[in-house]
Image: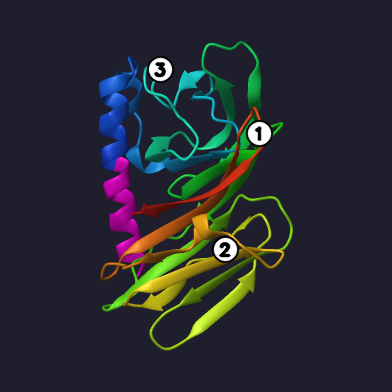
Amino acid sequence: MKSTKKSLFSYILVIGLWFMGSCQKDMDEFQNTDRGNYAGLACFNGLSMSNSLNMKIDEKFYSSEIDDFPAGSYIPYRTIFPGVRTISLQAKYANSFLFKGPMSFEANKLYSIFFYGANQAKYLLSQDDLSFPKENECKIRIVNLIEEKGLKLSISNAVKTESQSLNVEVTDFKTEALGTLTFSTSLINEELPELNFTLSPLNKGIYTICLYVQTNPINQQKTYKYEVIKY
């Protein structure tokens, strides 16, 4: 299993180095640095606001300076230097920051940041174990970015249904047998039809399902949404 983890991280590392080499001017610094001294970082925007955002690490653009980072979007793993990095999140064409603060990363490990919140940007930082499941299995985790209390989730397959209450959290990856999975959600016994969906996972597939909410700034009406991330 350790060799599987290592090969997956190496793949992400190569892709990340290619991206940085094509988009940043300091490639010489990366070429002269031991490639084993990197971490991998992915990000998801689950903020209630619909503003397009720019994300920076140590004042360098992590999301493209041209492309938006809107709610519901995902930035796949990219390589970063380990240590304490300053992460900032800023609405495009605005001077104020929605978030700015330090986060710590270790070399040879994969991380995900999940941003959420309405009036201010909050975040969940997870260290990700992306070891592959066995044949005829998949792995799934749930990220709940909906702050309302009483959120319940049920996952059903052909033989059983499992229910759980969710806080704002990143669950561990759980192994599931292949087959169609049905996800149903409720909020204080009120069904959320927007969050009732099915997933037909691939053999040895690894998935993160993000639950989040967007709020209409005019009438404050909430729309509950989900995003399926496949690795």
What's the amino acid at mark 1? Ala
What's the amino acid at mark 2? Thr
Q: Residue at x 27, y 39 (%)?
A: 15
Instruction: Tell me where residue 174 appears, x and y as whole percent.
Output: 47, 72
- Residue 7 among magenta residues: yes
**Crowding at label 3, few (<14), some or many (≥20) Cα neighbours within 10 Å?**
some
Q: Earlier in the sequence, mark 1 or mark 3?
A: 3
Determine whether 102 is above or below 72 in the image. Answer: above
Q: Which residue has dot 2 on it?
A: 171
Of residues 5 and 67, which is closer to you in this image? 67
Q: Quadrant of the C terminus?
A: bottom left
Q: Which residue has dot 3 on it?
A: 65
Determine whether 133 is above or below 33 in the image. Answer: below
Callout 1 touching callout 3 (CB < 8 Å): no
Q: Quadrant of the N terminus?
A: bottom left
**Crowding at label 1, few (<14), some or many (≥20) Cα neighbours within 10 Å?**
some
Q: Secondary structure at mark 1?
A: loop
Instruction: Tell me where residue 20 appears, x and y as whole percent.
Output: 32, 27
Structural distance between the alpha carbons of marks 3 and 2: 32 Å
Instruction: Please give the range of residues in magenta.
Output: 1-13
Q: Residue at x 45, y 60 (%)?
A: 129
Q: Which residue has dot 1 on it?
A: 121
Q: Main secondary structure of the magenta part?
A: helix
Q: Secondary structure at mark 3?
A: loop
Determine whether 11 is above or below 67 in the image. Answer: below
Structural distance between the alpha carbons of marks 1 and 3: 20 Å
Residue 125 showing in the rendered view: yes
Instruction: Tell me where residue 202 appears, x and y as whole percent.
Output: 27, 67
Residue 134 showing in the rendered view: no
